[in-house]
Image: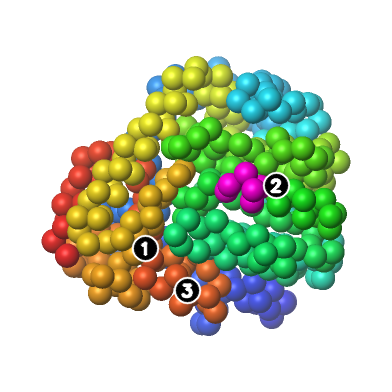
Amino acid sequence: MSGAWRRTAAGAGLLSASGEVAPTIFAEMSALAARTGAINLGQGFPDQDGPDVVLEAAREAIARGANQYPPGRGIPDLLAAISEHQQRFYGLSVDPDREVIVTAGATEALAATLLALIDSPDDEVVVFEPFYDSYAAIIALSGARLRTVPLRRPDFQPDLAELAAAVSDRTRIILVNDPHNPTGTVFSAQVQQEIVRLADRHDAIIVTDEVYEHLTFDSAHVPIATLPGAAERTLTISSAGKTFSVTGWKIGWVHGPAALITAALTVKQFLTYVNGSPFQPAVAVGLRLGEDYFRGAASAFADKHALLGDGLRAAGFTVSPPQGGYFTVADATALGGADAAAFCRELPERAGVVAIPLSAFVLPEHRDDYAGLVRFAACKKREVLEEAVERLGSL
Ligand SMILES: *Cc1c(COP(=O)(O)O)cnc(C)c1O
């Protein structure tokens, strides 16, 4: 019996050679930060909690007894709030009863969607590389094949010819992450249109991870589902953790055509069944906050990225300024960081800062293409970022 699970988990790259659970680079680097007292700009969790009214709503929900299983799809008030939010910000109409489910974070939405929609080992999932670490793991667990399209400097936009070459009749899903982690890129209108055209031509489903939808710095976020012909084949995923700085709450959602949502729900009900009873009404309060909250969050992040970017440049890094999200990517080659993985392992000792090499987000065979690049999290207080860039200045 153990042989069987070992084969499955090892095949998915989830076990280390010694048969232990392979620690993620984030866990390894967070442990290093804790051990050395370094400032942790590795893992992307905010060091300040979200808006008070949202936190208070969760406390109230516990006090009034929202402590048992919520409905399988999510509480009606949150489903309604998600529907209102999509209409208000993007003009998307979402039927709260049939076209959306609440999940245990965006992570479960991705897992349930991929596990539900992959039919056969011949199915392919097209992913933009570098990619968020759970993508490859879930694709492996689903049994599908991973096809990558590279995102390269300077702007990290995919090449349209390479994108077209990756999509075929074997493509079941095109998995998009926009705004993109780790590169901070926001896909151009042309790229979005090409994704929709290819999905339509090859009858693929678009799954789009938009957890940074409210953190764009140059322009308003455009969900791919708003493009002509896209909504009927797109599942859109969001995370309250990212939007309201409550990553530990693990409330996310996915919306799209009813048949696809039903498929995702059939898997979701056996992953977690439900989660976060008292957090669901609180997230509904958050989604109904005024423009000022959402605009304020984006501009606060833009300022933090500017501070971090200036400091990194002054320290000798070459910075790729992000258009959205939690992270700034910088090239450490001029600082002797041509091997960013080694550079990041030494950085806590050398400068008292933890960061993540971009090689952690790519397939082993593509690591050399991203060798000198490092990801720094900007989701920290200003004074923490100021201290971090001062320390990096000593390099
Ligand atoms: C943080 C993150 C997630 C996970 O979101 P949760 O709601 O915490 O599960 C998914 N995708 C990307 C790109 C992320 O950065």
Q: Earlier in the sequence, mark 2 or mark 3?
A: 2
Q: Is mark 2 within 8 Å of ligand 1?
A: no
From the image, tell me which residue sits under label 1. Answer: 374
Residue at position x 67%, y 64% from top?
A: 161
Instruction: Give the secondary structure at mark 3.
Output: helix
Prevailing secondary structure of the magenta residues: helix
Question: In the picture provided, is 390 more to the left or to the right than 9?
Answer: left
Is the residue marked by circle 3 packed among few (<14), some (14-19), or many (20+) residues within 10 Å? few
Q: Amino acid at mark 1?
A: Val
Based on the picture, tell me whether residue 53 belongs to the magenta stretch: no
Task: Confirm whether residue 218 shows in the render.
Answer: yes
The quarter in which the C terminus is drawn is bottom left
Disc 2/disc 1 C-alpha distance (Å) = 30 Å
Instruction: Report x, y in % for residue 171.
Output: 79, 62
- Marker disc for residue 15: none
Disc 1/disc 3 C-alpha distance (Å) = 13 Å
